[in-house]
Image (cartoon, rainbow, N blue to C red):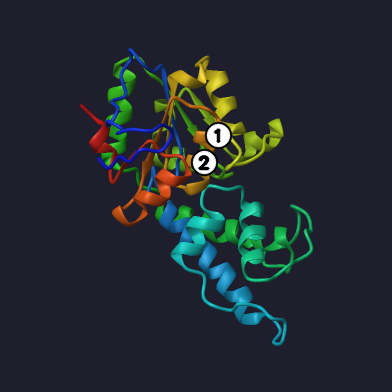
């Protein structure tokens, strides 16, 4: 477990998630509960690389291939169309907004986002989704101890992913991109979706834990005033996670169990 001081001065001691201090644990989905983050990354790469390759020359566009760093900074954890806008802006590209009904692959923000969703759903339908065993064990342990649990994801496929993994019954609340749109909630890095999920669970923010693998998500947990923000990341990403709001960073959620 890797911990570095962030919110307050002095040494930070790794904090256990206990019933004395917390009532609820709110999980991001892709990359935390399920391995689908890699599927999202691959779908985004296909969309953006095809767009950059096909863009007309002489427009001052940065045409480097979409990479893992681009995914983490501009796309991961955010609503789909926000991800399109963010990445394109980083490459000096502005597209018309379009609308949610735009054909997949059309040269609008919504068209590119819809193409990404088409690719992701095709992969999900073909290969299904896999949950991380260590995360599932910890969720079940938390529920045995009486914690309330929620999934909070920007993905509009959250319910489908949970159904594919058979984990829907492990969460008291599922707030995915569809529900966020219905409630008109701002997406991560705004804290609105996590705040709404905690409220639905009947948990005070200071007694709720946020578990995230995305920079946007840990920022949402920090800015929402949650009692503990756990980042899931590799050692090279620890400092960035802490700088953006994580109190504790782990490589695997087995480190939080027991």
Seen at 43% across and 42% down, the residue is 164
Q: Quadrant of residue 93?
A: bottom right
Left or right: where 98 falls relative to 142: right
Quarter of the image for the N terminus: give it: top left
Task: Pick whichever, 59 or 44, lies toward us.
Answer: 59
> For mark 1, what is the residue?
223
Q: Which mark is residue 18?
A: none
> Which is more toward the observer, 112 or 23?
23
Identity of the residue drawn at 52% across and 27% down: 225
Position of residue 25 measured from the top left corner of the image (x, y, whole percent): 41, 26
**Vertical placement of residue 146 versus 140, above or below:** above
Specify few, some or many for label 2: CA neighbours under 10 Å numbering under 14, 14-19, or 20 or more: many
Quadrant containing the C terminus in the rendered view: top left
| Residue 250 pos. (x, y %) | 30, 42
Looking at the rendered structure, the secondary structure element under dot 1 is: helix
Mark 2 element type: helix
- Residue 124 spot, x, y in % from top left: 47, 53
- Left or right of residue 116, residue 227 in this image: left
Q: Residues within 10 Å of mark 1 (few under 14, many from 20)?
A: some
Which residue of the protein is positioned furthest toward the front in this rendering? 9
Q: Are marks 2 and 1 in contact (CB under 8 Å)?
A: yes
Give coordinates of residue 67: x percent, y percent.
Answer: 47, 68
Question: Quarter-wise, where is residue 3 in the image?
Answer: top left
Q: Determine which quarter of the picture holds residue 15.
A: top left
Tell me what residue is drawn at x 53 percent, y 46 percent.
Answer: 216
Tell me, yes or no, if residue 113 can be seen here: no
Q: CA distance from mark 2 to mark 1?
A: 6 Å
Residue at mark 2: 219
User: Residue 108 vs residue 83: left or right?
Assistant: right
Q: Is residue 64 visible?
A: yes
Q: How many marks?
A: 2
């Amino acid at each position: 477990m890797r911990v570095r001081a962030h919110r307050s001065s002095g040494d930070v001691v790794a904090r256990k998630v206990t019933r004395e201090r917390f009532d609820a644990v709110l999980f991001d989905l892709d990359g935390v509960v399920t391995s689908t983050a890699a599927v999202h990354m691959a779908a985004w790469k296909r969309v953006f690389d095809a767009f950059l390759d096909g863009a007309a020359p002489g427009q001052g566009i940065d045409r480097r291939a979409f990479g893992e760093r681009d995914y983490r900074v501009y796309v991961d954890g955010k609503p789909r169309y926000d991800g399109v806008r963010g990445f394109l802006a980083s490459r000096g590209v502005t597209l018309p907004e379009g609308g949610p009904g735009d054909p997949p692959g059309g040269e609008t923000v919504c068209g590119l986002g819809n193409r990404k969703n088409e690719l992701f759903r095709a992969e999900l339908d073909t290969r299904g989704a896999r949950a991380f065993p260590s995360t599932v064990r910890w969720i079940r342990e938390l529920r045995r101890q009486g914690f309330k649990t929620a999934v909070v994801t920007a993905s509009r496929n959250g319910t489908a992913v949970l159904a594919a993994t058979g984990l829907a019954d492990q969460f008291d609340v599922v707030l995915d991109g569809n529900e966020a749109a219905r409630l008109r909630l701002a997406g991560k890095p705004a804290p609105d979706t996590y705040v709404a999920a905690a409220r639905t669970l009947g948990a005070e923010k200071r007694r709720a834990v946020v578990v995230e693998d995305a920079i946007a998500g840990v920022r949402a947990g920090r800015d929402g005033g949650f009692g503990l923000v756990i980042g899931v990341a590799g050692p090279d990403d620890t400092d960035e996670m802490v700088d953006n709001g994580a109190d504790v960073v782990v490589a695997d959620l087995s480190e939080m169990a027991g």
